[in-house]
Image (cartoon, rainbow, N blue to C red):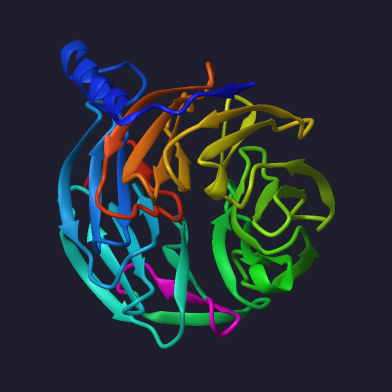
Amino acid sequence: MRWKRSSANRTVLFCLLAALLGPREGVADYAYVTNQSSSDLSVIDLERMTEIRRIPVPGMPAGVAVSEALGAFFTVSPDSKTIRRFGLADALPQIELQLDGGPIGIAIDDSRRRIFVSDWYNARVWVLLADDLSLMATLETGSAPAGLAISPDGRWLATADRDSNQISIFDADTLSLLHRITVGERPFGLTFSPDGRVFSADVGSNTVTAVDPESGRVLGRVRTGERPYGIAFATERGFVTNQYGDSVTVFDARTYAQVAVIDVGGYPEGIDTTADGQHIAVANWDSNTLSIIDAKNLEVVGEIATGDGPRAFGLFLAKDMQKE
């Protein structure tokens, strides 16, 4: 089953309908979307389906991580090698740090107030304190680490080591290495499912690989479209962005069987789930839009304009724009 992608005219229609009909129950999140080509970030109200703020983020930002617990969001600008912390409510910059390497992916350990940033060039992960971005430790990974993820229970840190065709699993508390697990070819993005399994998007083999982080055992594989990039979960299904397919592959999270393919905007990359689990947000790098998918009915219900070249590489949605 394949769903047709919305045109530019449909994007305008969606926004008009949202304005006429008022707030839609269940979609009250805010999206913090890094726009790499325009070196800024779009703050988007998903309830009203509109961009409410655009803030400058120098250095072509890509990675992003939002923490409601810390009242902050963090960006990674690979061009200037800079990590920045912003206030969640006011989107004002609070502190920044320049790193010597190739920062790209980012994840937050809320409970321990730690930030993890992958170093593409030096096969490592920086461990930073969230409050002041001071360096706490470094972790050794495989070659070209990209995506990072923390398990829902806070036990595990996972890294996608692209050029080693593996993921690394660390104990998030002690920071000790537990496993190096061979997955598909060139894993880039990865995420944990709600039940604690970790899934890698393997751009070189057009697969998603499911892994048990505790045992290190590969549990199954999913066939995707061309060049899978990011993964999100909702309604007991996985959703995978296919960069070259302008689409999202949907699979059953239990059986790994493909359920549907949904056409979205051009060159989709970042993907995340709303707090209520009813919608999926997809950043489309080529068409400068954020697509909103109904996770139950598997259809695009809105498209929102962003800055130029949205990446949103990481977890970029927040339920509330709250202060710490």
Q: Is residue 246 left or right of residue 209?
A: left
Q: Is residue 315 left or right of residue 140?
A: left
The x, y position of residue 267, in whole percent, is 46, 48
As rendered, which of 173 and 245 lies closer to the eye? 245
Q: Is residue 231 visible?
A: no
What is the quadrant of residue 284 in the picture?
Answer: top left
In the rendered image, residue 246 lying in the magenta stretch gets the answer no
In the rendered image, residue 128 lying in the magenta stretch gets the answer yes
The x, y position of residue 78, in whole percent, is 38, 74
What is the quadrant of residue 188 in the picture?
Answer: bottom right
Q: Is residue 275 above or below residue 181?
A: above
Q: Is residue 279 above or below residue 149?
A: above
* Residue appearing at x 25%, y 20% in the figure: 13
* Residue appearing at x 26%, y 75% in the figure: 96
Where's the N terminus, which quadrant? Answer: top right
Q: Which residues are magenta?
A: 120-132
The x, y position of residue 190, in whole percent, is 60, 54
Q: Is residue 232 left or right of residue 251?
A: left
Q: Is residue 242 left or right of residue 92?
A: right
